Amino acid sequence: MTDKKVVTYNDLIQGYVDKDYELECFKCYGTVEEVVRGRLRSYNLYKLVINPEHEKTLLITTGFHGEEFNGPISLMQIFDKAVAFAKERRARLIVYPCINPSGFDLHQRYNPSDKLKFGNNDFLRYEVKKNDWVGTLKDGEKFLQYKIIDSAAKEVRLLKRDVLQYQNPVPQATLDIHQDHLRKEQGDFYAYILDQREVYLKIMKKLTKIAPVSKNIQAENIEGQRKVSYQINNDGFIFLHDGSITDMFYRLGSKFAVCAETNTDLALEKVSAINLIWIKELIKLITK
């Protein structure tokens, strides 16, 4: 259920250019090369910075996983509304509209070349015992320290280098937009959060007017011989320190850090509506 006008990464970026954002705020933060369908392709990686003069900041990422294509497409579709709301509330937006362009073009999770042990949304390691470093913490697990690492995915290394310039101050809010292959009976959206349950619960109640929330689903993260079990709870939340960009910004001090998930089979207009609510509500929180 995708926008038929957006077939490739170039189509997606052209969608932003057609909105007249190119001269105002487009910035290329790196280039990657991948062999796609037998041809060597060079991809420029872009970000958009809106209202750079304002301090209150929402940083948005999407497109880590190439098969979750309605994440980037929905963000492009709602971008005008997000920008208008940010300008009204005097908030800065820093937006990475598609992190993994070759995966997006191929509709596959990762880029074709990198061999990934921990996936590509990979930014942190936790030392749970001396010299024992892991990517995901078990529920309530203590750790000695954490460190920011270089992902095995080349496009994520470039992203990390770029986002880490925003630390003085750190973005007050971050939103990472994803999708998940959920069965019909499992609901259509949920979110990874790390605290602020009562704050986010109010947002989730608004989202239930659009689609049913996912609840009480068990899941597992496997790193070699290590298994970390977790679940989507009755509120539609996952509390998990998983070394992702959301986890990294939480550790760096972002007050609001969310990873929003929608069902890959959910209609694009509903995906767009859900993601727009997350964007607007996070902007409200940082500009109160």
Image: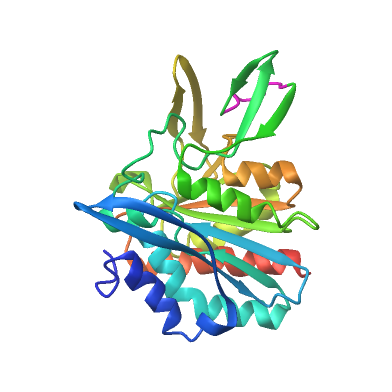
Q: Residue sitting at 68 percent across and 51 percent down?
A: 164
**Quadrant housing residue 6:** bottom left
Q: Nearer the viewer, residue 238 or 87?
A: 87
The residue lying at 56 percent from left, 65 percent from top is 95
Compared to 63, does 186 lie above or below?
A: above
Counting from the top left corner in percent of width and height, residue 49 is at 62, 72
Quarter of the image holding residue 199?
Answer: bottom right
When the figure is inspected, residue 31 is found, relative to residue 137, above or below; the finding is below
How far across and down, in percent of the image, does residue 57 sit?
Answer: 71, 65
Q: Which residues are magenta?
A: 136-143
Task: Identify whether 276 is placed above or below 148.
Answer: below
- Look at the image and say whether residue 2 sits in the magenta stretch: no
Residue 221 percent coordinates (x, y): 46, 27
For the stretch drawn in magenta, the main secondary structure is: loop
Quadrant containing the N terminus is bottom left
Coloring scheme used: rainbow
Of all residues, the one furthest to the left in this rendering is 38
Q: Answer left or right for 163 relative to 211.
A: right
Q: Is residue 103 visible?
A: no
Quadrant location of the C terminus in the rendered image: bottom right
At a point 71% along the width and 22% down the height, the residue shown is 143
